[in-house]
Amino acid sequence: MSSEPTLTLPRRWTSMTPTKDPRIHLMLATEWLPASGYRPRAVVTREPTALDLETYQGSLIAGVLQGLAEAELEEAEIYPVDGRPMSYLRIWHRTDGSDLMTEARTWIHEDVAWTVVSTVEHTDYPDFCDLFEDLTLHFEEPT
């Protein structure tokens, strides 16, 4: 039994020391800078919750859209992955002059919402969307 989740790092990605925010479990970024000039990144967060996944997804959408300037929800759904329900969000937003795509995938396990948030410059998105999906498929919450 493990009290920590496991995640397989993509090739040529590195992990960084999390901030002092207790919700941030792991931060990842590419070791290289794509032609767009924006370094793709991912963050694994954990947050205690008593909400069901659908309600949690609604609160996550509201919080994300409120916290980002020029943001647009492109997709939101809940579907099963490996027999467990997963929330999927894709959001376009603008930060510091960059047009970004962010995907967030969330599972709730023992009253903790685990979310993998991946962000890339929108022109790089076709090159990274499969990697982001693969990243979350290799995420295992604690047992």
Image (cartoon, rainbow, N blue to C red):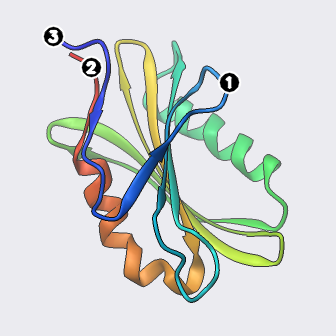
Badge count: 3
Q: Earlier in the sequence, mark 2 or mark 3?
A: 3
**What's the mark number on residue 142?**
2
Q: Position of residue 52 (x, y in %)?
A: 45, 23
Is there CB contact under 8 Å for labels 2 and 1?
no
Give the mark nearest the N terminus, 2 or 1. 1
- Amino acid at pointer 3: Met
Q: Secondary structure at mark 1?
A: loop
- Earlier in the chain: of badge 3 and badge 1, it is 3
Please state which of residues 20 and 117 is positioned toward the viewer in this rendering.
20
Q: Which mark is residue 20?
A: 1
Quarter occupied by the N terminus:
top left
Across and down, in percent, residue 13 comes to 39, 59
Crowding around mark 1 (Cα neighbors within 10 Å: few <14, some 14 to 19, many 20+) is few
User: In the figure, is residue 16 to the left or right of 37?
Assistant: left
Q: Secondary structure at mark 2?
A: loop
Q: Nearer the viewer, mark 2 or mark 1?
A: 1
Towards the viewer: 10 or 89:
10
Q: Are marks 2 and 3 in contact (CB under 8 Å)?
A: yes
Instruction: Kindly identify which residue carries mark 3.
Output: 1
Q: CA distance from mark 2 to mark 1?
A: 21 Å
**Residue under the image location 48 percent in, 78 percent down:** 125
Is 98 left, or right, of 138 in this rendering?
A: right
Callout 1 amino acid: Lys
The image shows residue 90 at horizontal and vertical percentages of 53, 62
Give the answer, above or below, for where 112 lies relative to 126: above
